[in-house]
Amino acid sequence: MKLWESISERTRFIIRLIIIALSVYLSFRFVLPLVLPFVFSYILAWIVRPITEFLYRKVKLPRIVGGSVSLILLVILIVTGMFYLGNILIQQAINFARNLPIYLNILAGKLDSICSSCDEILGLAAGSVRSTLDDNIIKMVDRVKSNLIPGMTTQTLSLTIKIIGFIGTFLITIISAVLIVKELPEFREKYKNTNIYNDINKVTSKLADTGIGYLRSQLLVMVMVAVCCVTGLVVIRNDYALLLGIGIALMDALPFIGSGIVFIPWSIIMLLNGDIFGAAVLLTTYLVCQIIREVIEPKLIGNRIGIKPLYTLMAMYIGLKLFGIAGFILGPVGLVIIITIIKVVNSKGTKTYSLDKGFDLE
C-alpha cells in the first residue's frame, strides 16, 4: 500500500488505465462470445419492457405473459417487414438472373471492342489481348472449380450444424428475454442497495445508453446511405434500384471497400457510352455517400456516445485491427467502458489522476 501511494498520481492513472483496457480486451475476446445471446436478450427485454410494464400496471397481466406477447409481436413485426422487403428483393434478383445472359452478351461486345482497341494501340495481332484475357478467365474459373466448390461441398454438413445451432441460440435468446423482463424488477429491488450493484449499475446504465445510441447511429447511417443509393439508381431508372442500392450500402459499410468500387467504374462506363446524365448522377450519389460516411457518421456517432469524432475513429480502427469487422462496434463501446469505469473509480472518492485532465476525450 505504501509502495502504491509513493507512486505519482499520473503513473497510478496510467497503471489503472492499462489494467482496465487489458481487462476490457480479454473480456471482449473470451467472455463476450459466451454471454452474447444474453446481451441480445437484455436488448430485446429493454425494447419490450415499457409495454410489459404498462400491461402489468393497467391490465394486471403477469410480466412473463406480457413479455411473451410483446416479444411475439416484435418478432412478427420484424419478420413481416423483412418478408415484404425480401419479396421485392427476390423479385428483382429473379429478373436480374433472367436478364443476365443479355447483360453478359452486352459485356462481351464491349470487351471485344476494348480488346480490339488495345491490339491497335499496342500494335499486336488481332485477337491477342482477348486471347490472353480468355486464358486468364479460364484459369480463374478452373481455380474456383478446384478450390471453392469442393470446399463448399465439404462444408455443407458444418453449415447445417451451424444453422441448427443458430436456431437453438435464437430460442435461448427469446426465452432469456422473457425471463429478464419478469425477473429484472425483483432483481433490482433486492440488490439496489448493495455497493457492487451501484458500481455495476453506473457502468451498465451508461453503456446501455451508449450502446443503443451507437447501434442506432450506425443503423441510421446505413439507412441514409441505402436511401441515397436507391434514390440515385431510381433517378437513372435502373430496374434493380432497391436490390443494388441495399447491396451497395452493405458494401459501403465494410472496411476498405466502400460504394466507390461500384459507382466509379459504373460511371466511367456510362461516360464512355455517352450517357453523361447517368454518369453525373452516379458520381453525385457516390459523393453524397462519402459525405455521409466521412462527415456525418463520425459526428453523429461521436455525439451519441459522448466522445470526440477523432477518438471515435481511432477506436474504430483499433477495434478493426483487434476484432475484425465487429471491431467497428466493439472499439467505441470498449472505449466508453474504459472511460466509464475510470470515472466510477474516481467518483468513489479515491484521489486519482483525472481522465478529463489526462485526455480530453469528451
Image (cartoon, rainbow, N blue to C red):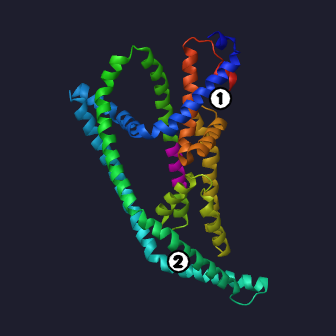
Confirm whether residue 83 shows in the render.
yes
Q: Tell whether label 1 touches label 2 (CB within 8 Å).
A: no
- Numbered tag placed on residue 103 in the rendering: 2
Residue 361: mark: 1
* Image vertical order of residue 5 relative to residue 20, above or below: above
Nearer to us: label 2 or label 1: 1
Around disc 2, counting alpha carbons within 10 Å, would you say few (fewer than 14), some (14 to 19), or many (20 or more)? Answer: few
Q: Name the residue located 78 percent from the left edge and 83 percent from the top edge.
A: 122
Quadrant of the rendered structure where residue 38 is? top left
Residue toward you, 154 or 183: 154
Q: Split into 4 quadrants, where in the image is the N terminus?
A: top right
Majority secondary structure of magenta residues = helix
Q: How many marks?
A: 2
Residue 340 colored magenta? no
Q: Which residues are magenta?
A: 218-228
Q: Nearer the viewer, residue 147 or 177?
A: 147
Task: Work out how far the residue at label 2 is from the one at label 1, CA to CA, in angstroms.
Answer: 52 Å
Question: Is residue 350 depicted above or below 275 in this figure?
Answer: above
Residue 153 screen position, x and y as percent: 42, 67
